[in-house]
Image (spheres, helix red, strand yellow):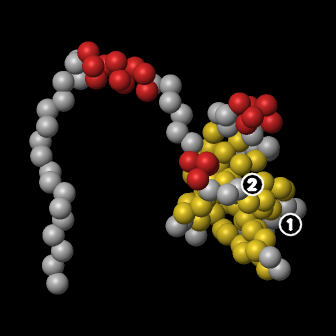
Amino acid sequence: MTHKSHAKVSNVRVDWNDPQLESLLHRSESWRLDNRGGYSPQDVQVYLGWSGTVGRAAVLVWERDQSVVLETDFPIGQGEQIRVDKHLGESIRTLWGVVVEERKGQREEDRLKGLHLYWLHVR
């Protein structure tokens, strides 16, 4: 069975000096995209290192496939191996991941609470 895509590819020249395009790009320069609004935050326990024994409270703010975003009030280094325990009723689901990106929270409440966001690649 063959599948035909309905998408058409075309070469379109963009005039980057067009005043309307420049105006649009200028207005969108300061936009900060934040995916946390579409996912229900979940309290989790974070353990640094594969054999960490002391968990720290964090919030899982986004999850899809092999990616997870955590919100913490403590720093975690890029490349750090992380174990995340999610409580699912009476059971616990454990995720194993590595921090691939980090940044300070940009929302007003993030800055007031000193929150950090960490993107994990989950194995």
Asked which quadrant contains residue 14, the reply is top left
- Label 1 sits on what residue type? Thr
* Residue 81: numbered disc: none
Which residue in the structure is indicated by mark 2? 59
Asked which quadrant contains residue 40, the reply is bottom right
- Which of the two residues, 102 or 107, is positioned nearer the viewer here? 107
Q: Residue 96, relative to residue 111: is it above or below? A: below
- Residue 35, image x, y percentages: 56, 48
Element type where label 1 sits in the image: loop
- Quadrant in the picture for the C terminus: bottom right
The answer to whether one can see residue 47 in this image is: no
Q: Kindly report the distance in space between the C-alpha atoms of the residues bearing marks 1 and 2.
A: 18 Å
Asked which quadrant contains residue 1, the reply is bottom left
Element type where label 2 sits in the image: strand
How crowded is the residue under tag 1: few (<14 C-alpha within 10 Å), some, or many (20+)?
A: few
Residue occupying the point 71% across, 48% down: 71
Which residue in the structure is indicated by mark 1? 53
